[in-house]
Amino acid sequence: MSEGVKATVVGSGAWGTALALVLTQKGHDVTIWSFEEDVAASINAGEGNRYLDGVELPAGLKAETDLARAITGASVVVSATPSQFVRSVMGAAAEHIAPDALLVSASKGIELGSLLRMDEVLDDVLPASVMERFCVLSGPSFAAEVARGAPTAVVIAGRDEAAAVEARDVFLTSSFRVYTGSDVIGVELGGALKNVVALAAGVTAGLGYGHNTLAALITRGLAEITRFGVAAGADKATFYGLAGIGDLVLTCTGSLSRNRTVGYRLGSGEKLADILADMSAVAEGVKAAEAVREMARRHEVEMPIMEQMYLIVHEGKAPSEALRALMSREPKAEDWS
């Protein structure tokens, strides 16, 4: 199933559209499902997608607003909606997904309320036969750069090794390099938790701090993610790879990072409500901060950076006070266990 398959990408945001573009360039017959009629109309008219401004989309890429029509007959289904909509959208899609379809999740986040990873959410709403061939795609990959053909490396982890290899071959191009793995939990958590650290990275920049502060934040943020991931059943080594440190560095340092941008504006003194009202795309870290805090408490894992970001985002704590609280914690040995 490496070339010429029928593939459907569920979600027409920047990331879903970038992945649809990769699949189209690989020679697949690709349909992208959009909740927004104007986005679908723009794609079908050859006018591009406002979420990927300035990127020319190939004529072969089709958009559809009817979920059943978009998915029926697809041998590859990519779930790429924002994490808080995965349950409702993929639940509605369930009856239309072929039992032997290859399912690839590209949504990064934790569901509020249930505190479930995206693979667990999909377990709830999709048939077991489909979930046997479930894979998750993650890694350092800004949508705009992927769409423009910048050399990019990601990882696809699957519950079944053969399915992961199959998914790799579906996506692999000369500019989109795909590695495979089996640690679904670790890849899921790396993609979700790094968004909260990216908020913190933006906050420090907004406060006027530089490279020393950022390096410390990334390193200690990785320690928190790793500590939590191991407690949740992930492989520690996953967080030293593309879905861990790779994605974390990109999201904490890149100017295209929505989460870093939100953090920067918070650190500069803006109110969260005003920031979110000004954004068309979703910054997953805002929702994740709440979920991660509760998850850390359930697993009894110490995550001070995540805790302070929750207090900034959801309780209005001043960013300068949050940073002061982190720097004044009791001294201790550096521990990566």
Image: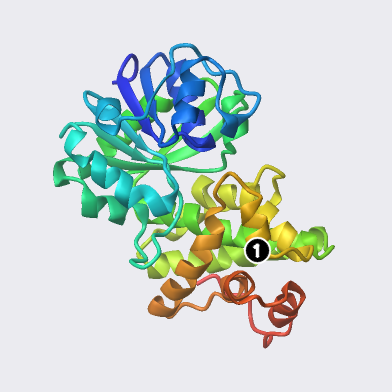
Please, which colouring scheme is shown?
Answer: rainbow
Which residue occupies 57% across, 70% down? 306
Q: Amino acid at mark 1?
A: Leu
**If the image is split into quadrants, where does the N terminus sit?**
top left
Q: Quick check: 26 above or below 139?
A: above
Q: Is residue 130 visible?
A: yes
Question: Between 230 and 282, which is closer to the camera in this rendering?
Answer: 282
In the rendered image, is residue 183 in sight?
Answer: no
Q: Residue furthest top?
A: 59
Q: Position of residue 127 (x, y in %)?
A: 16, 45
In this picture, residue 161 sits left or right of residue 175: left
| SS state under label 1 | helix
Query: Number of marks in the image?
Result: 1
Residue under the image location 42 percent in, 59 percent down: 110
Say which of 278 and 241 sits in front. 278
**Residue where numbered disc 1 is placed:** 272
In percent of width and height, residue 59 lies at 48, 11
* Horizontal and vertical percent position of residue 7: 33, 24
Residue 143 quadrant = top right
